[in-house]
Image: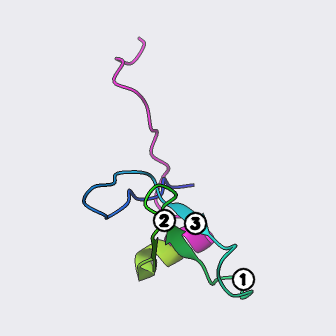
Amino acid sequence: MPLPPKCPTPDCDDWLWKDTAHTNTDWDNWRWWCCRCRHQWYPTADQLQEFRYGTSRPAVAHRGPQPARR
Protein backbone atom coordinates (compact mmCIF):
# COMPACT_ATOMS: atom_id res chain seq x y z
CA MET A 1 0.00 0.00 0.00
CA PRO A 2 1.43 3.41 -0.89
CA LEU A 3 2.08 6.02 1.76
CA PRO A 4 -0.53 8.77 2.03
CA PRO A 5 0.45 12.34 1.15
CA LYS A 6 1.38 15.02 3.64
CA CYS A 7 -1.10 17.74 4.58
CA PRO A 8 -1.06 20.61 2.05
CA THR A 9 -1.72 23.25 4.73
CA PRO A 10 1.42 25.47 4.94
CA ASP A 11 1.74 25.28 8.75
CA CYS A 12 1.03 21.55 8.98
CA ASP A 13 3.06 18.63 7.66
CA ASP A 14 1.17 15.75 9.25
CA TRP A 15 0.27 12.62 7.28
CA LEU A 16 -3.24 12.51 5.85
CA TRP A 17 -5.71 9.72 6.59
CA LYS A 18 -8.19 8.09 4.24
CA ASP A 19 -11.43 9.13 5.91
CA THR A 20 -14.51 7.06 5.19
CA ALA A 21 -16.27 7.68 8.51
CA HIS A 22 -17.53 11.19 7.70
CA THR A 23 -18.58 10.66 4.07
CA ASN A 24 -21.49 8.97 2.33
CA THR A 25 -22.06 5.25 2.49
CA ASP A 26 -20.88 4.72 -1.09
CA TRP A 27 -17.95 2.27 -1.00
CA ASP A 28 -15.62 4.60 -2.88
CA ASN A 29 -16.63 7.93 -1.36
CA TRP A 30 -13.71 9.04 0.78
CA ARG A 31 -11.61 12.13 1.49
CA TRP A 32 -8.17 12.88 2.84
CA TRP A 33 -8.40 13.97 6.49
CA CYS A 34 -5.75 15.72 8.60
CA CYS A 35 -6.07 15.00 12.31
CA ARG A 36 -3.77 17.88 13.23
CA CYS A 37 -5.44 20.81 11.44
CA ARG A 38 -8.81 19.04 11.01
CA HIS A 39 -9.25 19.76 7.29
CA GLN A 40 -10.58 17.51 4.55
CA TRP A 41 -9.49 17.35 0.89
CA TYR A 42 -10.75 15.51 -2.18
CA PRO A 43 -8.27 12.95 -3.49
CA THR A 44 -6.94 13.43 -7.02
CA ALA A 45 -7.95 11.03 -9.78
CA ASP A 46 -4.51 9.37 -9.54
CA GLN A 47 -4.87 8.96 -5.77
CA LEU A 48 -8.36 7.49 -6.16
CA GLN A 49 -7.01 4.94 -8.62
CA GLU A 50 -3.93 4.14 -6.52
CA PHE A 51 -5.74 3.77 -3.19
CA ARG A 52 -8.75 1.98 -4.71
CA TYR A 53 -7.00 -0.89 -6.47
CA GLY A 54 -3.37 -0.53 -5.47
CA THR A 55 -0.59 0.55 -7.73
CA SER A 56 0.55 -1.39 -10.76
CA ARG A 57 4.10 -0.18 -10.18
CA PRO A 58 6.56 -2.33 -8.23
CA ALA A 59 6.56 -1.67 -4.51
CA VAL A 60 9.11 0.81 -3.23
CA ALA A 61 10.89 -0.07 -0.01
CA HIS A 62 10.68 2.76 2.53
CA ARG A 63 13.82 2.47 4.56
CA GLY A 64 15.91 4.62 6.81
CA PRO A 65 19.21 6.22 5.81
CA GLN A 66 21.31 3.25 6.96
CA PRO A 67 23.54 1.68 4.31
CA ALA A 68 22.53 -1.64 2.80
CA ARG A 69 24.09 -4.80 4.24
CA ARG A 70 26.53 -6.69 2.07
Residue placed furthest toward the top = 70
> Which residue is at 59% across, 78% downward?
30
Q: Amino acid at mark 2?
A: Arg
Image position, residue 43 (x, y; %): 45, 77
Dots 1, 3 in contact, CB < 8 A: no
Image position, residue 13 (x, y; %): 34, 51
Who comes first in sequence, dot 1 or dot 3? 3
Residue 2 drawn in magenta: no
Dots 2, 1 in contact, CB < 8 A: no
Q: Which residues are magenta?
A: 49-70
> Which residue is at 50% across, 49% downward?
59
How far, Cα to Cα, is label 3 from label 2?
13 Å
- Horizontally, residue 17 falls left or right of residue 67, namely right
Who comes first in sequence, dot 3 or dot 2? 3
Q: Is 65 above or below relative to 3?
A: above
Q: Amino acid at mark 3?
A: Lys
Q: Where residue 27 is drawn, which disc sits there? A: 1
Instruction: State the predominant SS element of the stretch in magenta.
Output: loop
Image position, residue 26 (x, y; %): 71, 88
Q: Is 43 above or below relative to 2?
A: below
Q: Which residue is mark 3?
A: 18
The image's colour scheme reads rainbow
Q: Secondary structure at mark 2?
A: loop
Question: In the image, which is nearer the foreground, mark 1 or mark 3?
Answer: 3
Q: Which residue is mark 2?
A: 38
Who comes first in sequence, dot 2 or dot 1? 1
- Horizontally, residue 46 falls left or right of residue 48, namely left
Question: In the image, which is nearer the foreground, mark 2 or mark 1?
Answer: 2
